[in-house]
Image (tube, rainbow, N blue to C red):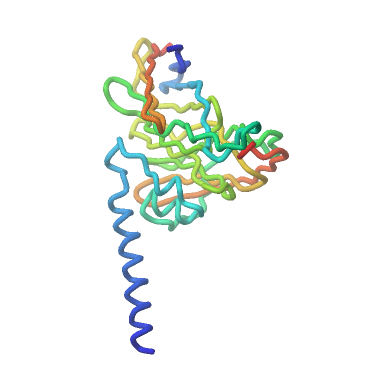
């Protein structure tokens, strides 16, 4: 029994180490690399941790998501994220229930304003989550969008 | 090849707003061809970079969940009208294209 729990402990430990390693090596500093694991992640938590190195986040009232309450066509959902958080270095847009939740990540230089907009695909009715990275911490906001016709697949 | 990028930049109130439209299929790789039932291979833009005066202002990483013929807009400070902004995209097949625009 002891041996079993010991094994479990080490396995869990190594998994954490791997996750931390991935976080450290994530291409924040290397602009050319595309964060494949973050885009392939199947859950919001995984996407956040492989993109930003941590999934710790807190809800913030300083992020505004502009998206339709009801999107007739899930293939084209306009989303605008606007934040007044100072020193925002990245804004990620996540569609919570898509097969691969991470839709886009925008890295902002210091002179870029905290506003990005784009159009994303959404499979069904779900929350759009905006993640703003500022000073090493993650701030999030979410908005529910009802989708009448899904936009993934044909 | 036909131009795939339409970009517009406008300075007002100290900030420059850039809007761009890119013509691209943005295939997710999950869709099936209705006639043959074969999967349509994934083909989407992975990175979009915007530069002003040799410096990157915004570097976006996209997944297949960005809509077909993507639109993006953002704003930045420190540029004046008459400057040039340059936008470059790269897709998952390694194709890339860039275009520039004068800030109005």
Residue A59 higher or lower than B63, as above or below: below
Residue A52 left/right relative to B8? left
Q: Position of residue A72 (x, y in %)?
A: 71, 34
Q: Residue furthest bottom?
A: A1
Task: Name the image quarter holding residue B78.
Answer: top left
Task: Name the image quarter holding residue A35.
Answer: top left
Q: Position of residue A80 (x, y in %)?
A: 55, 34
Q: Residue at x 35, y 30 (%)?
A: A111
Give the camera-side residue of B98 and A127.
Answer: B98
Residue A41 left/right relative to B82? right
Q: Position of residue A43 (x, y in %)?
A: 51, 54
Residue A78 higher or lower than A51, as above or below: above
Q: How many marks?
A: 0
Q: Quadrant of the N terminus of chain B?
A: top left
Give the camera-side residue of A4 and A47.
Answer: A4
Q: Residue furthest front?
A: B36
Q: Quadrant of the C terminus of chain B?
A: top left
Give the camera-side residue of B38 and A61.
Answer: B38
Give the camera-side residue of A67 and A153.
Answer: A153
Task: Name the image quarter holding residue A121.
Answer: top right
Q: Position of residue B60 (x, y in %)?
A: 41, 34
Q: Residue at x 45, y 13 (%)?
A: B3
């Amino acid at each position: 029994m002891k041996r079993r729990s010991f094994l479990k402990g080490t396995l869990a430990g190594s998994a954490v180490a791997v996750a931390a390693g991935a976080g450290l090596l994530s291409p924040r500093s290397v602009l050319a690399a595309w964060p494949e694991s973050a885009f392939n992640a199947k859950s919001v938590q995984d996407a956040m941790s492989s993109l930003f190195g941590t999934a710790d986040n807190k809800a913030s009232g300083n992020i505004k998501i502009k998206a339709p309450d009801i999107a007739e066509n899930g293939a084209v959902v306009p989303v605008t994220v606007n934040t007044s958080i100072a020193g925002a270095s990245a804004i990620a847009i996540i569609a919570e229930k898509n097969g691969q939740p991470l839709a886009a990540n925008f890295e902002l230089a210091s002179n870029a304003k905290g506003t990005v907009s784009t159009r994303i695909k959404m499979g069904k009715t779900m929350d759009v989550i905006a993640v703003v990275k500022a000073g090493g911490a993650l701030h999030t906001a979410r908005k529910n969008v009802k989708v009448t016709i899904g936009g993934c697949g044909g | 090849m036909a131009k795939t990028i339409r970009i517009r930049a406008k300075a007002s109130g100290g900030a420059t707003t850039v809007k761009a439209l890119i013509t691209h299929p943005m295939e997710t790789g999950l869709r099936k061809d209705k006639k043959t039932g074969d999967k349509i291979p994934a083909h989407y833009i992975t990175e979009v970079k915007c530069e002003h005066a040799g410096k990157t202002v915004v570097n976006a990483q996209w997944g297949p969940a960005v809509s077909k013929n993507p639109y993006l807009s953002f704003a930045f400070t420190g540029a004046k009208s008459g400057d040039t902004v340059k936008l470059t995209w790269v897709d998952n097949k390694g194709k890339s294209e860039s275009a520039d625009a004068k800030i109005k």
